[in-house]
Amino acid sequence: MYRFLFLLASLLLSGAAWAQPVTFGASIQLTGPVANTGRYYKDAYDFAVEKINAAGGITIGSARHPIALRILDNQSDVNLSVRQYAQLLSQDKVNFLLGPFASNFVLADSSIAEKVRVPMVQGGGASDQIYSRGYRYIFGTLPAASNYFGSTIEAMAKLNPKPERVALLYADDAFDVSVAKGTRALLQKAGLRLVIDERYSTNASDFSALLSRIKSGNADAVLVAGHETEILNFIRQAKSLNVSPKLYSFTVGVPSADFRHALGKDANGASGMTAWLPSATLKDRWFGNAEEFARAWKAKFGYEPDYHAASGVAAVQALVNAIEAAGSTDPQKVRDALAKVSFDSLYGPVAFDDKGQISLPQIMVQIQDDKVVPIYAGKDFINKLEYPLAPWSKR
Amino acid sequence: MALLLQVLVSGILLGGLYALMALGLALVWGVLNIVNLSHGALIMVGAYVTYFLVTGASIDPFAALPIAAAVLFAIGYVIQRGILNLVIRGPMFNTLLITFGIEVILTYLAQLWFSADFRTINPNYAGSNYSLGGITIPFVQVLAFAIAIALTVAMWLTLLHTRLGRGIRAAAQNLVAARLYGVNPKRIYALTFGLGAALAGVAGGLYGTVSQINPYIGGTLTAKSFVIAIIAGLDNPLWVIVGGLFLGVIESLTALYVGPTYRDVASFGILVLILIVRPSGLLGRAA
Amino acid sequence: MKRIVWMALLAAAVAVLAALPWIGNSVLVQFGINVLLLATLAQGWNIIGGYAGYPSFGNSVFYGLGAYGVAIAMAQYQLPFWVGMLLGLTLGVAFAALLGLAVLRLKGHYFAICTLGLALVMTAIVSNLEIAGSNIGLVLPLHRGEVLFYELALGLLVLATLSVFWLSRSRFGLGLIAIRENEEGAAVLGVNTTLYKILAFVLSAAFTALAGGIYAYYITFIDPAGAFDIVLNVKMIIMAVFGGPGTVLGPVVGAFILSAISEVLATKVTSIASMFFGIVIVIAVVFMPRGIAHLVANIRRTGWRYFAENVRTHRL
């Protein structure tokens, strides 16, 4: 009898200590054309929630609440993702929202969050449009598109010989157009001359015309803002057409393992940027530091994380920190707490500006000997940049 | 001038590969009157088959092509015999719909088994090129071009001079009469579709050497193949080469002189204009 | 007598649907908006594809034009929604009339491919137009609440269905059916085939464009890929064909059933959801190519043999 009562009591007590779960919901591209990046976000949300729950979940007052996660597959269909977010809110009654990947998805999905007045923290969209609508419930952990080439251009201005003629190519989607706009301004400020400035269609597979122009225009440096598949095409065709600029830098792909895997040796020399490197100096409340996080991720999922993954984890952590700061799960209070949140994480320092976007500098990186090497951050060179690149025929 | 020549050469080489892609579609359409919306998906499957042969069994990509062709032939044969033969005498619209359904299924299965990660077929001679009078000619694309031409000519010769070819053409023109002459329609149809799929398979393998493979490349490739089939008309495989080259050059010139974002306007604009003005194709007989 | 019962039932159904925002939950309303718009598209396609027999694979052009009409009016010029709807409708109808002259001369699958090509060209052209926001798209003002969109979509579907009902009993409709069955014969009998075809195309475009306009305001963000979605073409055709092309209620029923199944799959089983449409298409085209309406009308007579009959008549 007493044993039964004791069991009951301990169950009740632990139940009281382990209170009502707080639910996060997200609609992610798990199938469909962008699924290979969507997967980073699902794994990031899963991993972050798992670690936070293992450490006791979210502390509100004296109660500790576990996080419950509900993820739906939107099949890379924007319309479906909008309906799924609506469903997450009204049927599954999630407390807060995490974002999908890609700016065009975020643009449509964030409207639901704003309409219903529930905060959404997204780590997948960076285009200017997201933050210029005056929405108050959307926060993002990807830094501004317009500054993606910031550190690269600063580094370029310090090179000797300085690149005389710069070519800028960009895909015609929201994110890359924002990047290009910002890049033009940065190039002008640095005094670098832009000789080719071309927009191409998303998913383009043939760059021969553009590459031929780069070659005949003698561009020294080529900056490309596009998607992984386009950049893969670009590099392979550059090799087969023997187009060898002294420097080329890409907005995506370079930090990601599957990109380097797809190109093999041809990836060497490519520059890029990342807001995140798995460095031990980035301390984290739940994962120790970024280096340990990367190792744990690789062990758990079988592939290396990149900034998409870190951004996803940061989004979860931002919500948790805001809930704890607000001391409640009331959407309005958490939204206000999100606006003021500021903490260190494996992703770096997390804080949002008055439009809801994080501000993180990009680190210029380059692939050397099949490894991603940080080159320039802040105001200095960290490592030597391989410049000028040897022509293809001599590699 | 050198720039224009380089772009023209690139356009021609691209056009060769385009032509090979369109060949299977044109064959099936011209002979069986089946508008195969899953053609691009078959190209995609061919690309994957080649990819796995290259990475799994370390076969050279160009040596893997015949194997991919055989595999795709079998798949095409089964699709025709098992599914398409069931609706072929109904309204033509039904074959359009059903091939779309097949495309959806193939794409889904590819995503399920191969995931959405990009694959590339990257032999170590992938980047090598020749230089001719200041123009750089990529080796792999020349090879793809040569294979495309060779297969097209082979297809033309087969249709004209072999028993199988005559059987196919007879079945296309008058099925009842062909039956009276001993042609087994079910088998002939399945063989033809299989041939079309085999050609798609080879095109896929070559595509994988110059671009990326993922389950979703089918749609665009089907659309491009359509444009070429319409330009070329459905009578003679040789015109498909011309159609492919035409499209490749137009796309490259549009990218150079108008702007890279206008390529699709050019390709599909041509499709629409030709259909409106001369439905049997730029090069086919007048309707 | 039977007719009155039918009418009463339908009127009741519409009344229930109209009351949904108050008796159902938000998820149902969202789903409802989606289904009602799709059903309108299917019904619009029914006019040109089902009745006139010209299978258009490019109705997404009108959908996109309607969407961009609203988007440009509201986002670029800050005009009210109804002005945008008018603009979208005008664009859609004008395009249908002009293109119809050129394109309706083609027959059968050539018409299908030409319209598909048109859809692809439009996407490419609009992605280069500054006023349409190029490929980045346009952001529309946010409207809080879904009731507006729901009721508008329901109203549009009712209007479209009533139009098809009127059409099915009018000389115009009979003319279209004549064109579908034997165009040359119809011409000989004095039907003005060109005028009728273009009118059908224009009517189809009108409903499609209005649906696109509602969609744009609802989703607050329009880009070429989303507005001129090629897959939408196939979806509307599948729904119309599955339900019964050339009937009044067939496309609506087809849209409701297929959307419901698709939505349930997408939320519960997710993994095979994308393959669902593919399998439905294959099975439906093989076993019931004339749609549910025909199935329901005939299955009582022939029983299970209905399916075998379909296969037998159409297979090689």
Image (cartoon, coloured by chain):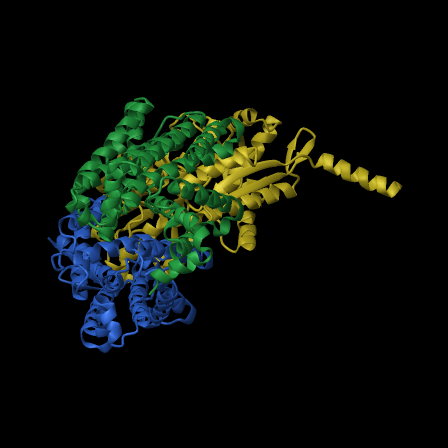
Q: Is residue A331 above or below residue C105?
A: above
Residue lying furthest right:
A1
Residue under the point 19% across and 40% down: C99
Q: Position of residue C293 (x, y in %)?
A: 40, 46
Report the front residue among C40 and B132. Answer: C40
Image location of residue A140, percent across then percent down = 46, 34
> Above or below — where is A313 with respect to C131?
below
Total marks placed: 0
Letter of the blue chain: B
Where's the N terminus of chain A, which quadrant? top right
Left or right, C252 with reference to B176 = right
Q: Is residue C220 visible?
A: no
Residue drawn at x 17%, y 50% as measured from the top left: B275
* Frontmost residue, A125 versus B285: B285
Q: Which chain is green?
A: C
Q: Which quadrant would the C terminus of chain A be assigned to in this image?
A: bottom left
Q: Nearer the viewer, residue C256 or C8?
A: C8
Which quarter of the picture shows residue B80?
bottom left
Q: Is residue A45 shown to the viewer in this render?
A: yes
The chain letter corresponding to yellow is A
Residue B213 percent location from the top left of the image: 36, 58
